[in-house]
Image (tube, coloured by chain):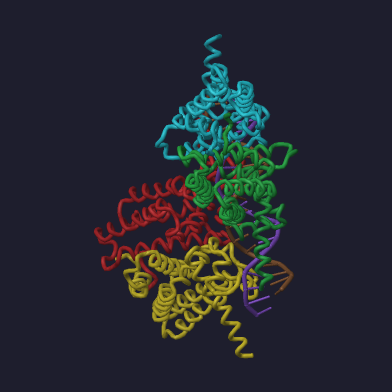
Chain colours: A yellow, B red, C cyan, D green, E purple, F brown
Amino acid sequence: MEEKESRKNDKYEKILEAAIKTFSKYGYYKSTVSQIAREAGVADGTIYLYFKNKDDILKNFFNYKAREVFSRFKEEVKTGKDALDKLRRLVTCHLRAFESNREMAIVYEVEARRRRHLIDDKIREMSNMYQELVKEIVELGQKENTIRKDLSVPLVKQLMVGAIDEVITSWLYSSKKYSLSSMAEPLIDLIVKGIGK
Amino acid sequence: MEEKESRKNDKYEKILEAAIKTFSKYGYYKSTVSQIAREAGVADGTIYLYFKNKDDILKNFFNYKAREVFSRFKEEVKTGKDALDKLRRLVTCHLRAFESNREMAIVYEVEARRRRHLIDDKIREMSNMYQELVKEIVELGQKENTIRKDLSVPLVKQLMVGAIDEVITSWLYSSKKYSLSSMAEPLIDLIVKGIGK
Amino acid sequence: MEEKESRKNDKYEKILEAAIKTFSKYGYYKSTVSQIAREAGVADGTIYLYFKNKDDILKNFFNYKAREVFSRFKEEVKTGKDALDKLRRLVTCHLRAFESNREMAIVYEVEARRRRHLIDDKIREMSNMYQELVKEIVELGQKENTIRKDLSVPLVKQLMVGAIDEVITSWLYSSKKYSLSSMAEPLIDLIVKGIGK
Amino acid sequence: MEEKESRKNDKYEKILEAAIKTFSKYGYYKSTVSQIAREAGVADGTIYLYFKNKDDILKNFFNYKAREVFSRFKEEVKTGKDALDKLRRLVTCHLRAFESNREMAIVYEVEARRRRHLIDDKIREMSNMYQELVKEIVELGQKENTIRKDLSVPLVKQLMVGAIDEVITSWLYSSKKYSLSSMAEPLIDLIVKGIGK
DNA sequence: GATGAATGAGTTTTCATTCAT
DNA sequence: AATGAATGAAAACTCATTCAT
C-alpha cells in the first residue's frame, strides 16, 4: 500500500518535473502534452490519469513544487531572531532556492507571476503567501524599531518582491557569470538603507 | 494625399489598438487573429496586409506604441535638473503613462518584460533603453553626491525597475481604488531612503 | 483606333507572357495572380479586365500563344511536297519552336498535355489539332506508298506525338548540352524505320 | 501481433488508396486533405499520423504503390529469353498493369511524369529505373543483332517511353471501348519495324 | 493502471476576386 | 481603363483530449 502510494507519487512527480523542464524551455503554450509525456517517459494518456488537463499541470506546479519551496521560506523567516535577520534569511533562501532550480525559477517568473489574473485562485493565493511573509517582517521591524514607521506596508511589500524578482530574472537571462545568491547581501543593504546619501 | 496617408495609418493603428485590447484581455496565445480583426472592424486577411503574422503584431506594439511612451521617459529625464529630480520625473511619468493606458500596460508587463529571451532583438533593445535611463540617473547622482557610491549600478537598476513594475502590476490587478500615480512619491522616498531606520 | 487596339493587345500579351514565365517557373497552382501582375508590370485588378479569372489565363495561352505556334506547324506541313517531307518539316519545326521558347514549352507539356480531361474543350481541341496533322501525313504516305498500310492511324499518331513530347521533355529537364532541333533527323529516322534490323 | 501489424498497414494503405482515388479524380492541387480523409474513412488528423504532409502522400505513392508495379516490370524483363521477347513482355506487362489500375495510372502520368524536376529524388530515381530497363533491352538486342546498331540508346528510350505513355494517356481519356493491353502487339510492331515501307 | 492511435475542433495563413476611387 | 486595398472563403495542419485494448 505504502509502496503503491509512493509509486503513484513517483509518476506524478516525474510528470511534473518533465513539465517544468519543458515549460521552462519552450514556454507553456508552445509546450505540447506529448512533449511532456516523452520527457517523463510515459504515454500521453497517462498524464490524464494524474492531471485533469494541461492547465492543471501548471496549477499543480504551484501546489506541489512551489509550495514546497515556499514553506522553506516560511521556516527561514520563523528561524530568524529579529526583523532584519528574518529579512536576510528570506532573501538569501529565496535566491538560493531559485539558483539551484533554474527551470522552476523560469516557470515561476514567466508563466505565473505575470499572469495572476488569468490563473487559478490557488496560484494567486500562493503568490500572496509570499507577500504575507514580507508583511510579517515589516511589521515586526516596525515594532522592534529597526524599520521606519512612516511607510505603507503594501508598498514595502511591492518594493521587495519586485526587486527580488527582477534580480532573479536578470540573472536567469544573463550569461550567469555571477552567482545569484551573492546578490543577497548587497540587495538587502539597498532595501534597508536606500540609494540616497 | 494627406488624408490618404492618415487613412493608411489609421488602419495600421486600428489593428494595433485592437490587438492590444485583445492581448490584454485574453493574453497573446489565447487571442486569435480573427478576434483582433473583429475588434478592429476589418477582415481577417486585412491584418496580413499590415503585419507579417501574429507575432509581428506584438513586435510592432513595441516599435510603435511602446517606443512612443519610452521616448517620453527620455524627455522627462532630460528635463530634470538633478539626479533626484530626474528620478522623480521618471517614476512619475512612468506611472502616469501606464495608468492612462491600462491595456498597453498589461501587454507590456505580461507579454514582454518576462519574455526577453524569446522575443525579438528590438524588444530587448527597448527594454535595455529603459535600464539605461536608470543608469544615467544613478551615475549622475553619484557625481552630485546625492546618491551613495558604494553600490552596484546594475543592482540599483534592478531594484528600481523591479519595484516600479511590481507597483504597476499590483495596481493592474487591484480593484483600483487608488490612483497609480499617487504611488510615485512614497515609492521614490522608499527607493532613496530605504526601509531601515 | 488602330493604335488603341494595339495598345490593348499590348497589355493582353504582356500579361500572357508574364503568366507563361511564371507558370513555367512555379507551375500553375503555385503561381499567384499577384506574381503574374508584378511580372507584367500591371496592377492585380488589371488582369481581370483582360481575363475572366486565373483559369482563363491558361486557356488563353492555348488560344493565343499556342495557336500561333500550331498554325506555323500547319503551314510547314502544307509546304512539304510529300508525306516524308511533310513529316520531316513538322518534326523539325516543332522541335525548333519549343527550343526557342522554352517557357512556353514547359507550360504546354506540364500544364496542358497531361490534363486533357481537366481542362477546357478549347484546349483539347488544340491538342487534337496537332494530332490531325499527323493523321493527314500518315494517310498521305499510305496513298503515296511510302508508309505501311497495315497500321492503325490513331496508333501511329500516338507513337509520334508521344515520342516527340518525350524528346522535348527530356531536353527541358536535361542540362541542355545538346540542341533540341538536332534530335529531329535521328527521331524521324527511328519513326520511319523502327528499331529492328 | 500479426494482426496488429496488418491493421497498421491497413490504415496506411487505406489512406494511400483514398489519395490515389482522389488525386486521379480532381488532380493533386484540387484534392483536399479532408476529401482524402473522408474517402479513407478516417479523421483529418489521422492522415498526419501516417504522412508528414500532403506532399508526402504523393511521395509515398511512388515508394509504395509504384515501386511495386515497377518491380514487376523488372521481373518480366528478366524472364524474357531475348531482346524482342523482353521488349514484348515489358510493354505488355506495362499496359496490363496500368489497365488494371486506372487511378494509379492517372496519378502516375499526370502528377508525376511531367514534374520530374519538381518532385522528390525518389521519384526521379523511379523514373530512371524504367528507362534503365529499356536501355538494357536495346543493348542486348544490339548484341543479338536483332536491333539496329546505328541508333542512339537514349533516343530509343525516349521513343519507347513516350509512345507507351501516350498510348496509355489516350486510353485513359477515351471512352475505353478497347482494351489497353490489346495495343501491345501493334505498338511493338511499330516500334520494331517503323512506319516506313 | 497504462497505452497511444484516433479524433476533430480550432487556428493561422493564403490568395483569387471585387470594387470604390 | 487602371489601380490596389480589402475581402473572406478555404485549406493545411496542430494538438489537447478520449477511449478501446
Q: Quarter-wise, where is residue D112 in the image? A: top right
Q: Position of residue B125 (x, y in %)?
A: 38, 53
Q: Is F6 located above or below residue B156 in the figure?
A: above
Residue found at x 61% / y 49%: D89
Q: Please, is residue A122 above or below residue B18 in the view?
A: below
* Above or below: residue A192 compared with residue D143: below
Q: Which of D134/C110 is in front?
A: D134
Whether residue B85 is visible, yes or no, is: no
**Residue A118 visible to the viewer:** yes
Residue closest to the far bottom = A2
Tell me which corner region of the image, top left, top right, bottom left or bottom right, holds residue A3: bottom right
Q: Give left or right: position of C63 versus B140.
A: right
Q: Residue furthest top?
A: C1
Q: Residue at x 56, y 82 (%)?
A: A10
Name the quarter where the C terminus of chain A is drawn: bottom left
Q: Depth check: C57 or A121 in front?
A: C57
In terms of depth relative to the viewer, which is nearer, D102 or D20?
D102
Tally of numbered discs: 0
- Residue A30 in the image: state x and y as whole percent: 53, 61
Judge from the rendering whether residue D33 lies leftward or rightward of residue A105; answer left or right: right
Q: Position of residue B135 (x, y in %)?
A: 32, 58
Please state the horizontal and vertical placement of residue B96, each as a whole percent of the image.
47, 52
Quarter of the image with the N terminus of chain A is: bottom right
**Which residue is pictured at 48% across the width and 84% down the height?**
A75
Q: Residue at x 52, y 16 (%)?
A: C7
